[in-house]
Image: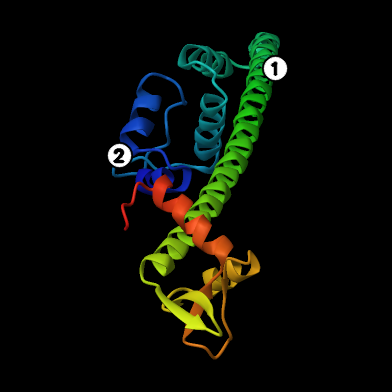
Amino acid sequence: MTIAEVSEKYDISQDTLRYYERIGLIPPVNRNKSGNRDYTEEDCKWVEFIKCMRNAGLSIEVLIEYVSLVEKGDETIEARKELLIEQRNHLIKKIEDMSKTLERLNYKIEVYERLLVEKEKELKKEMFTFMDDLREKVKELTLVLLYLTSWEEELLDMKYRRSWKGYDFGILDELADDDLIRGGYRSKSVAITDAGINKAKELLKKYKIEFD
């Protein structure tokens, strides 16, 4: 394989592959007749091995030492084994430390998730409270407007204050349920009850609206 093919296969830049070979991190790569690098299966195994070890956190110095021992032959097998055991122990310790860190991160994330859920509930509660308050204010101001635009009528020696039904029917229904206004479904106007008139007068004071 060419260096470009190896670079693409293992996602390692060509400059890095040359650097690894130059410092002895991988054994000298086979060359073709033109002098260009021609990676054999064995060369590729070394590249894959070094990439794996580097990703695991092994230092360049340790890996250079390992490659050097390999090149010295079988008499270094025991030394190579000891080196790998030592690095394995370091890696196990590192994994344990990372696991503890991961546990702590998970705990922190769970805490923040609980806080976010609680905050979301609070915001929803505040929003519903705000909407309820807003609807109550709309209801109050609708009654005020009904009163301000009302006129007096007399029927069977009884006086009534009436106003046009030019407002939200849902709000008008609520005012009717509270016995503040009365009026038929087909009627274009509503009658403001005595309770409605008294309530409207209270609201005029509440909202500091002057009306004679």
Residue 164 appearing in the image: no
Determine the image quadrant of residue 79.
top right
- Tell us which disc is closer to us: 2 or 1: 1
> Which residue position is annotated with label 2?
35
In the picture, measured across the screen, residue 106 lies left or right of residue 151, that is: right
Picture layout, residue 173 above or below residue 88: below
The amino acid type, in three-letter code, at marker 2 is: Gly
User: Residue at (52%, 54%) from the top-left corner?
Assistant: 131
**Residue 91: horizontal and vertical position, in percent?**
65, 17
The amino acid type, in three-letter code, at marker 1 is: Glu
**Residue 177: horizontal and vertical position, in percent?**
65, 68
The first of marks 2 and 1 along the sequence is: 2
| Label 1 Cα neighbours within 10 Å, binned few <14 / some 14-19 / many ≥20 | few
Determine the image quadrant of residue 212.
bottom left
User: Residue at (45%, 55%) from the top-left corner?
Assistant: 201
User: Residue at (51%, 39%) from the top-left corner?
Assistant: 44
In the picture, measured across the screen, residue 45 lies left or right of residue 141, that is: right
**Residue 205: horizontal and vertical position, in percent?**
41, 47
Picture layout, residue 72 above or below residue 53: above
Query: In the rendering, which numbered label is found on residue 96?
Result: 1
Picture layout, residue 141 above or below residue 85: below
| Residue occupying the far bottom of the picture | 186
Which residue is nearer to you in this view: 25 or 212?
212
